Image (spheres, coloured by chain):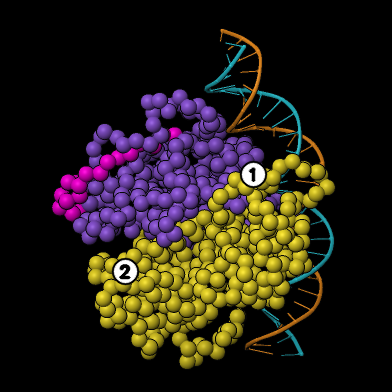
Chain colours: A purple, B yellow, C cyan, D orange
DNA sequence: CGCGGAGTTGAAGCGTTTCAAACGGGGTGG
DNA sequence: CCACCCCGTTTGAAACGCTTCAACTCCGCG
């Protein structure tokens, strides 16, 4: 199932890293993939778009390279990686179905980061020069693109929220909750997750050492919140995970009991929290914790 | 020039927190403010836009609230803040001239974060329902908006880069370099910076405790890299700052000398670095370190 | 004048980083 | 086919650096 990460040139024979698919698709598929319902006549359904296949470990966008194409991810998963000045590989985000890729390069002309396939993927390509005309012809495409951009802007918030937590297990919990939320949105079980990426990539996204990610996994597993089997994990206690995730920094929300022997866990220590009274003065629910328990 | 930083309620009398300005502006001003040169006929110059004034500490966008307006920041500076589930106030970014605000709410319908003025500011408002027609009438406005969005997407990278550094002084250095880069882009001295925000806000953005920010400031100052005077700082050694900023995590780029007594500073320990030989194998310059020394 | 907030500095505790080693799987090559 | 090696993952141990709590100064304002 998994190809080797380095070496392994065998699929250079009959499996090209990126190639057009023989199947056909239309602009209507693009709009639907972006999570938008199309309400035009049948305009969009008549405009053909060629889907592309991206093999695992193949890179779609090259950091520093040019690209006159926007991509809409239809299936598979990708990672966006930027190599910092000191050589550190910073993972910016993982992309799933509906993601828009390549827009970051619009203002600078070059790709600020690389995009690599974590597993075989299918994408639709939109030529940048055609965008103005396309948007005028297809109002729902314009809407879909704008919505996708709006969604992507909220990733600043997600990234900051994940890396802002002091405790590494809180960061991991937030990451898992975000993933589970996504799974629920695409009508899949939010309890069973499969990673296409390694510990090192997760560590980079969370801003910790990869050993720490490993330790955090066993920590959450030992707490009975989830079951871990290498790259497959099962969430056992969604509420418990949320509790773990809800500790950004010191303050602890509820002041008063700062007894030295109480570890650093504020309300975390309680295994079950049926407490009906909500925290007041916080009307907003963060995106990472919006997932409803089933 | 500078308004008072805190307290100072005297403007509650005849200074409303947000009010329209008597001055007039046109869509051409909006496009120019977004950093785009307009090449339409004189269309844009004939479409009036009313500029709004936002007083210091007044909030433009309310987290969880509605807004049918996009804003383009003309002058002043803002901060974007999100209150997490645990009550922690996470600063997402600071906004300067040319920034587009309010687009994040497009897909969800509500603002995911608050936007507060760090100093008196002037903004142009664009009604969301008018956008489709505006974009068709003014191609250069569409371009300008898309470029602005493209720029904003790269903030994911900036945020991750800042919070990914292990050492807190590296995070601060990256923050300062980013600020200096911006100053240079708007043709102001990149050596003298004035903050409208407090240590607590910077700490939130960097993902550390506010005491740590204070300590990092004195650390960089003691190293002779900058001079600190409360909210005014002067950068003395740009190259030294870059060196400090270029340590994300362990690896240290150049292996070989892992002698235990050498602290955790790789090439950082050297007070002055006239070393002309650059690091090889790293062709890409990160956005945070792209600033040229003068 | 006194309060309160912002900023700085100190000291102690602890979690993460870092260096090491061991385990396991997967593919390679003998 | 099996040994071998590489790499991802896990676990251990020591040390550093950050967080946390606390005290203090400075400053503006009531």
Q: Is B272 situated above or below B62?
A: above
Query: Percent position (x, y) of residue B221?
Result: 74, 68
Residue A109 relative to residue B132: left or right: right
Residue B119 seen anywhere in this rendered image of the structure:
yes
Residue at the image point whose x is 54% and y is 31% from the top: A6
Kindly indicate the quadrant of the structure image that contains residue A150. Answer: bottom left
Mark sitting on residue A209: 1
Which residue, given by chain and number where applicable, does mark 2 sit on?
Answer: B140
Image position of B238 (left or right of D12): left
A133 over D12 or under it: above or below? below
- From which residue to which does the magenta span run? A39-56
Of tags 2 and 1, which is closer to the observer?
Answer: 2
| Mark 2 residue crowding within 10 angstroms, few (<14) / some (14–19) / many (20+) | many
User: Residue visible at 28% across and 73% down?
Assistant: B40
Residue at mark 2 shares a chain with residue at mark 1: no
Gap in Å between the C-alphas at discs 2 and 1?
45 Å
Output the chain of dot 1: A
A41 relative to A96, above or below: below
- Secondary structure type for disc 1: loop
Looking at the image, residue B257 sits to the left or right of residue B38; the answer is right
Q: Is residue A54 magenta?
A: yes
Q: Residue furthest bottom?
A: B14
Along the line of sight, which residue is nearer the eye, D26 or B243?
B243
- Where residue A25 sits, quadrant-wise, is top left
Q: What residue is rendered at 57% in x and 86% in y?
A: B1
Q: Quadrant of the C terminus of chain A?
A: top left
Residue visible at 45% across and 66% down? B63
Q: Which circle marks residue A147 in the picture?
A: none
Secondary structure beneath disc 2? helix
Q: Residue B9 location, x and y as percent? A: 56, 86
Q: Chain of mark 2?
A: B
């Amino acid at each position: 199932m998994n190809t080797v990460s380095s070496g392994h040139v065998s699929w250079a024979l009959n499996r090209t890293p990126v190639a057009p698919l023989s199947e056909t698709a239309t602009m209507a598929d693009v709009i639907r993939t972006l999570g938008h319902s199309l309400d035009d006549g049948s305009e969009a359904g008549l405009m053909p778009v060629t889907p592309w296949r991206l093999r695992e470990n193949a890179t779609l966008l090259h950091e520093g390279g040019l690209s006159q194409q926007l991509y809409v991810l239809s299936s598979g998963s990708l990672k966006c990686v930027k190599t910092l000045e000191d050589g550190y590989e910073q993972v910016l985000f993982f992309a799933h179905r509906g993601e828009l890729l390549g827009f970051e390069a619009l203002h600078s002309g070059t790709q600020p980061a690389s995009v690599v396939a974590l597993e075989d993927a299918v994408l639709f390509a939109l030529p940048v020069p055609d965008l103005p005309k396309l948007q005028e012809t297809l109002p729902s495409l314009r809407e879909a693109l704008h919505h996708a951009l709006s969604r992507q802007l909220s990733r600043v918030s997600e990234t900051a929220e994940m890396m802002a937590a002091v405790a590494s297990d809180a960061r991991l919990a937030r990451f898992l909750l975000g993933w589970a939320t996504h799974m629920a949105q695409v009508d899949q079980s939010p309890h069973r997750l499969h990673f296409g990426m390694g510990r090192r990539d997760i560590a980079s996204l969370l801003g910790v050492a990869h050993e720490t990610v490993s330790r955090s996994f066993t920590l959450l597993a030992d707490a009975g919140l989830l079951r871990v089997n290498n790259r497959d994990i099962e969430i056992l206690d969604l509420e418990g995970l949320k509790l773990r995730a809800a500790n950004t920094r010191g303050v602890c929300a509820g002041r008063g009991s700062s007894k030295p022997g109480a570890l650093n866990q504020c309300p975390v220590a309680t295994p079950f929290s049926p407490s009906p009274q909500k925290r007041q003065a916080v009307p907003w629910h963060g995106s990472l914790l919006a997932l409803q328990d089933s």
